Image (spheres, rainbow, N blue to C red):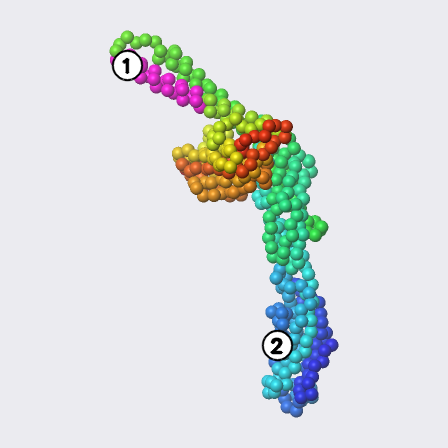
């Protein structure tokens, strides 16, 4: 206990106890004993000074005492359960001010020890995601405690059908700080064709080695070859065959009439034009299927040969002709060392491209930069040396309107050196944009 009193003072005060400990969100009380040593009736006012004054209270706030008498007031300390509540020993004092004789002020002193508390909140974003080869998630972690927290992320599934990659593996969060841990989920076995498979998994954020509550997530594995692609090929081929049969069976015979010949000639040209159009559609769909199959084989191998597609080329394919169907389009770029090159995809008229994720590949291990722009606005800027195979999902799809351009530009600094292959003279990067093509 502390007892302070000057020889000239007529008031005395002491704290009981002079020091205490309190947890944030809790409360502790201290008794202040006050005595009037003067010869007149005196009123006393009380004021807490120091850092604890922000979360302290005095009751009653004023006290009147006859000469030679004493009484008590109660001090209550209630530090908030918040990240900015300081930890450790905090000194404070109580100013006991006599109203009639303010020069006889008394100031007893004490200390409050604020104890640490830990509170980490985590959230999986999004809870469910889809992809053919992988899916990206983020785990948002916020430290609500008043002490730094070391957090690590773990993921697992009971069927052991998935593999996981976490970046960064751990993070240190200051009080009140929020961080994001990236989680990439990959299937152990790929699906060439068939139905979508849903895999449930869980993640858990551990704080300073203490595990937290598990978070539920789901990965929807899509087949490498879209389910409607064979039907689209068959329908396109059947249409082309029917038009060809119509040409040879109905319109080719000679008509002697001049007017009839003219009509036949015009019809012949129209049918031939339609046949060529259908043949192009079949070739386009077949090319998309071959591209998808080649991509699956290349990703399954350890070392992928550089693409034979010319620098700056781009192509697209839809999983279905239905409105709002899943859509993907590849972009591939080759650039010489010290130069840059780009590839562009333009959204068709009357359509809107909703991009939900982007798969990037740097099979050679090139160094330089890769930039993705939408109508001249930069969306991503990545260093090539930081990845070989990357999936970048967006929780909210990127909207590219009709006529909008998605451009991937590669600034090649140094081509990589793939194992067991001659050193290339160009950087070779590719991107696969996935999403939906909807009607504008």
Residue at the image point whose x is 68% and y is 76% from the top: 109
Q: Residue furthest left?
A: 258
Q: Residues within 10 Å of mark 2 (few under 14, many from 20)?
A: some
Q: Residues within 10 Å of mark 1 (few under 14, many from 20)?
A: few
Regarding mark 1 in the picture, which secondary structure is present there? helix
> Dividing the image into 4 quarters, which one contains the C terminus?
top left
Residue 100: image quadrant is bottom right
Q: Is residue 298 something one can see in this rendering?
A: no
Question: Where residue 147 appears, x then y in whole percent?
Answer: 66, 58
Q: Which residues are magenta?
A: 259-281
Residue at the image point whose x is 68% and y is 65% from the top: 88
Question: Where residue 308 appears, x then y in whole percent?
Answer: 52, 26
> Dividing the image into 4 quarters, which one contains the N terminus?
bottom right
Q: Which residue is mark 1?
A: 262
Question: Where residue 115 appears, x then y in whole percent?
Answer: 69, 63
Residue at the image point whose x is 60% and y is 28% from the top: 422
Q: Which residue is mark 2?
A: 47
On screen, residue 418 above or below 262: below
Residue 352: image quadrant is top left
Q: Is residue 380 something one can see in this rendering?
A: yes
């Amino acid at each position: 206990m502390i007892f302070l009193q000057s020889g000239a003072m007529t008031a005395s005060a002491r704290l009981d106890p002079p020091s205490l400990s309190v947890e944030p969100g809790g409360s502790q009380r201290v008794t202040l004993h006050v005595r009037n040593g003067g010869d007149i009736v005196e009123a006393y006012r009380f004021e807490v000074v120091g850092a604890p004054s922000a979360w302290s209270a005095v009751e009653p706030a004023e006290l009147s005492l006859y000469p030679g008498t004493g009484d008590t007031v109660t001090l209550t300390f209630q530090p908030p359960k918040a990240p900015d509540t300081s930890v450790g020993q905090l000194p404070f004092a109580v100013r006991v001010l006599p109203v009639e004789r303010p020069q006889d002020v008394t100031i007893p002193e004490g200390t409050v020890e604020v104890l640490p508390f830990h509170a980490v909140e985590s959230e999986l974003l999004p809870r469910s995601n889809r992809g053919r080869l992988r899916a990206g998630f983020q785990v948002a972690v916020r430290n609500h405690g008043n002490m730094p927290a070391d957090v690590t992320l773990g993921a697992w599934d009971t069927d052991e059908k998935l593999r996981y990659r976490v970046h960064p593996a751990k993070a240190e969060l200051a009080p009140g700080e929020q961080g994001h841990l990236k989680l990439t989920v990959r299937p152990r076995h790929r699906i060439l064709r068939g139905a979508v498979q849903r895999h449930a998994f869980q993640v858990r954020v551990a704080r300073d080695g203490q595990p937290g509550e598990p978070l539920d997530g789901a990965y929807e594995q899509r087949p490498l070859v879209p389910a409607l692609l064979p039907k689209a090929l068959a329908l396109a081929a059947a249409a082309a065959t029917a038009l060809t049969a119509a040409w040879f069976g109905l319109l080719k015979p000679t008509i002697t009439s001049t007017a009839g010949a003219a009509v036949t000639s015009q019809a012949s040209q129209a049918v031939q034009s339609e046949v060529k159009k259908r043949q192009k559609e079949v070739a386009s769909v077949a090319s998309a299927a071959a591209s998808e199959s080649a991509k699956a084989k290349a990703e399954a191998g350890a070392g992928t040969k550089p693409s034979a597609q010319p620098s700056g080329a781009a192509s697209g394919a839809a999983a279905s002709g239905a409105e709002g169907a899943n859509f993907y389009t590849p972009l591939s770029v080759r650039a010489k060392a010290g130069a840059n090159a780009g590839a562009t995809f333009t959204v068709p008229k009357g359509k809107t491209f909703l991009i939900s994720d982007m798969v990037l590949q740097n099979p050679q291990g090139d160094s330089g930069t890769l930039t993705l722009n939408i109508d001249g606005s930069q969306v991503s800027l990545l260093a090539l040396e930081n990845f070989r195979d990357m999936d970048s999902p967006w929780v909210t799809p990127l909207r590219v309107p009709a006529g909008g351009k998605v451009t991937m530009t590669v600034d090649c600094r140094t081509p990589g050196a793939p194992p067991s292959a001659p050193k290339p003279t160009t950087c070779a990067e590719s991107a696969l944009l996935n999403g939906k093509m909807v009607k504008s």
